[in-house]
Image (cartoon, rainbow, N blue to C red):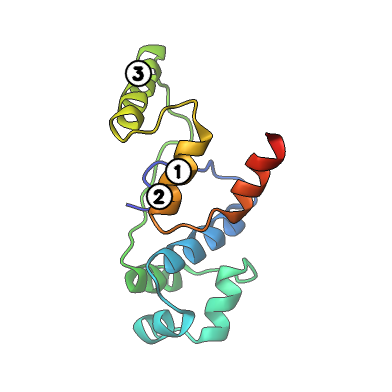
Amino acid sequence: MLFDNISYSITEDIGVNLAIRLRLAREAAGLTQSAVSRASGIAVPNLSRIESGKADLRLSTLDRVLDALGLDIQLVPRTTRVSIDEVVALSEQGREQLMAAGLGASSPRQRLDARQRGGIDITVEQTLLNADA
């Protein structure tokens, strides 16, 4: 899922984090605010306020937006204790996945080339990489 590896602690700016995540989820799904409006029954101006963090969202409204995006709420502990062994194992798994994909961990050029092959515009990154060379 889109946010499986992202977590935020609950802070006073949870509304802003939620707003950003809702907008990113909508964009990742290739949906316009109009499409979400039709699916949720929430007016486009209200969706705009929600996505900009300017709306104090009721749970029922959030539920309608999430339904339109095909998402669910997941509650996670604020702090999760992870052993150093788990961190090392996950790091090694990630390194192995990079190597299997032909992306050496120390090669920014290879990673950018792979992103470009995937259809991602890397103009800014290329400019920065070339400036450092």
Q: Which residue is mark 2?
A: 3
> Disc 2 and disc 3: Cα gap in Å?
20 Å
Q: Nearer the viewer, residue 37 or 78?
A: 37
Where disc 3 sits, the SS reads helix
Residue 21 horizontal side relative to residue 124, left or right = left
How many numbered marks does the figure carry? 3
Mark 3 or 1, nearer chain start: 1
User: As shown in the figure, which amino acid type bears the numbered disc 3?
Assistant: Glu
Residues at marks 2 and 3 touching, judged by CB atoms closer than 8 Å: no
User: As shown in the figure, which amino acid type bears the numbered disc 2?
Assistant: Phe
Mark 2 or 3, nearer chain start: 2
Q: Nearer the viewer, residue 24 or 96?
A: 96
Residue 110 horizontal side relative to residue 54, left or right = left
Q: Is residue 94 visible?
A: yes
Where disc 1 sits, the SS reads loop
Q: Which residue is mark 1?
A: 6
Residue at 33% x, 18% y: name it: 89
User: As shown in the figure, which amino acid type bears the numbered disc 1?
Assistant: Ile
Q: Which residue is mark 3?
A: 86
Q: Residue furthest top?
A: 85
> Disc 1 and disc 2: Cα gap in Å?
5 Å
Q: Is residue 115 above or below residue 121?
A: above
Residues at marks 1 and 2 touching, judged by CB atoms closer than 8 Å: yes
Residue at 66% x, 41% y: name it: 130
Crowding at label 1, few (<14), some or many (≥20) Cα neighbours within 10 Å? few
Pinpoint residue 106: horizontal percent, then vertical percent: 49, 25
